[in-house]
Image (tube, coloured by chain):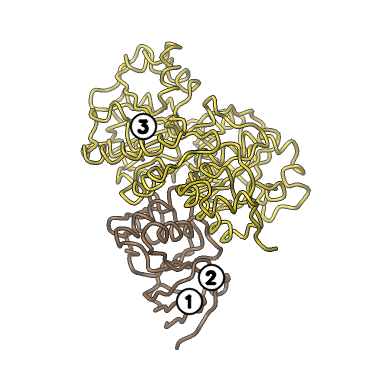
Amino acid sequence: MDKVIHGQVVIRGQAQGTALVSREPLSFWGGYDWKTGEIIDRRHPLSGSVAASRILVVPFTRGSSTTTAVLLEAIRAGTAPAAILTTEADFFFALASVVADELYAKPFPLIALSADDFNSLQTGDQLIIADDGAITVQQ
Amino acid sequence: MPFTLSSRDQAMLNGKHGLATKMAMSILVRMAEVADATTLLDITGAHIDSTIYIGDAGLEFAERLASLGAKVAVPTTLNVSGLDEHHWQEWAVPPDWAHQAQRQMVAYQSMGAVPTWTCAPYQTDMKPTFGQQIAWGESNAIVFANSVIGARTERYPDLFDVCCAITGRAPAIGLHLTENRAGQVLLQLVDVPMAVQESEEFYPILGHVIGKVAGDRIPVVHGLAASPDEDRLKALGAASASSGAVALFHIVGVTPEAPTLDAAFQGRAPIETIEVTMEVLRKARAELTHAEGEGLDMVVLGSPHFSLAEFKQLAPLVAGKRKHPTVKFLVTSSRAMAMLAKQAGVLEPLQDFGGQLTVDTCILATPMLPPEIKYLMTNSAKFAYYSPGLLNKQITFGSLADCVRSAAAGRIVRDESLWNG
């Protein structure tokens, strides 16, 4: 059954795709192969999954300050997630979207969810994200 | 509260200070709004991590700013680049990569930043001072500046640090503000023997624990009886900013904003208290080793970049010995630190041992290691954390002495005496 959840719009935009969900934070540097979109942090539960064109759901970024630069490469290469959902307004993800907008006019939507909404999402859910931050979830 | 810009900020945003400043200020303002800032503040120093060549998007960003005439407005250091500019040909770096990485170095240098090419800018002449407002990139540098020096920077990502450097401004948020620097999570050391606390290995292991427990919260370590030097705190910070998103830690009685437990928490109560026992430390030590067996192709030291003091510790360990012919032994550092080590006579023992030195970059930032190198060993929790994913190499964590001993033996040899039990 469909449900609709509302998050805080950090970067506005529309997207749809299959959710790829982890409760563990992720560093893109050493964690994301921008040439393929594969998650390569071998200690991360999503290791081996491909996030390209999917909607990545992780609480926040971990560690390296190079996460933004790796995500920007992925956007240029077409291997980035279609959107990212987090539990807080993640500065590192947001910056990648803002710079992608400045350089390539290609921002991606970024939405911060409440803990309950975040925890309700599962890998494989079909998500449709609207401009106003409304997320339709088909589970 | 609404977001307000000064008239000077507004002029930068309108392009009155040039197109590069306009672009930098535009990014700064959009991000300040994301971060819920009400205003920007002046900074008096910056450290740019965007120097690392990842791919052509980062290069295009740097060259766009440079071509628009970008100049830094405050004293600015540069992080490691994607290239040891003068020695990359000795390694497996592809020439086309080298070409692009060098273009990126040129772009940032053209902005008037000091070409320090180091991830340890806090061990240069441009080290910030207590209370100074700065905008730094590079996770290990950020956590050191905030925690060990008491300078103030948010955890700024690549691409943003340079926008702050060009405008001389940063959002008035997070760790720039006193009230956000209070401890949140208490890590209480319980029955950790003094011999362990005085070992070099303890600090990266504790840092790994801190990062995992704290996530992006501010940890406070209580119960440390030893007096760690700057390099041990550097190793701890780098570890905590790898396994977690730690940008500031306090150690009661050691770091400048934590003369007492109460001061570290600014009088508030911890959100959570965690006991750090030998069992916790043993588990963390085991996690830092990703390899199985005794195989060893290369020892890698210097993440963060080796300091003069570390070269001085290494010299007597390698003196009079020779590494095993099948094992490489590499130290990464900055040009300036390598020069100081040479002048102090502590590079020679490393060379006589058969060790090599790489400057400007590190193994994680440049594709220097050939594919036949499969098994690494390090005393750096940061190398240990990132090597499996970034380099697809197996890695073993050990002390500096373990690393030297293993390089000489041609296989992994670790002293377990502190950790048995």
Compare residues B199 and B361 and report the one nearer the observer. B361
| x, y percent for residue B159 | 45, 48
Examine the rendering and report whether any part of residue B108 can be seen.
Answer: yes
Vertical placement of residue B5 versus B100, above or below? below
* Colour that chain B carries in the picture: yellow
For mark 3, name the chain: B
**Chain coloured brown:** A
Can you say which quadrant of the picture contains the N terminus of chain B?
Answer: bottom right
Residue position marked by numbered label 3 in the rendering: B300
Q: Quadrant of residue B104?
A: top left
Residue position marked by numbered label 2 in the rendering: A9
Question: Which numbered disc, 1 or 2, marks the residue that appears first in the sequence?
Answer: 2
Q: Check contact, mark 1 vs mark 2: CB within 8 A.
A: yes
Residue B43 left/right relative to A29? right
Q: Residue furthest bottom?
A: A1
Dot 1: within a 10 Å radius of its alpha carbon, few (fewer than 14), some, or many (20 or more) residues?
A: few
Compare residues B343 and B205 and report the one nearer the observer. B343
Q: Mark 2 is on which residue type? A: Val
Labels 1 and 3 in the same subunit = no
Q: Mark 1 is on which residue type? A: Asp
Please, what secondary structure does the residue beneath circle 1 have? loop
| x, y percent for residue B206 | 55, 40
Mark 2–mark 3 Cα distance, whole angstroms, equals: 43 Å
Q: Quadrant of residue B115?
A: top left
Q: Nearer the viewer, mark 2 or mark 3?
A: 2
Vertical placement of residue B178 versus B322, above or below? below
| x, y percent for residue B93 | 24, 36
Compare residues A28 and A95 and report the one nearer the observer. A95
Residue position marked by numbered label 1 in the rendering: A131
Residue B257 left/right relative to A113? right
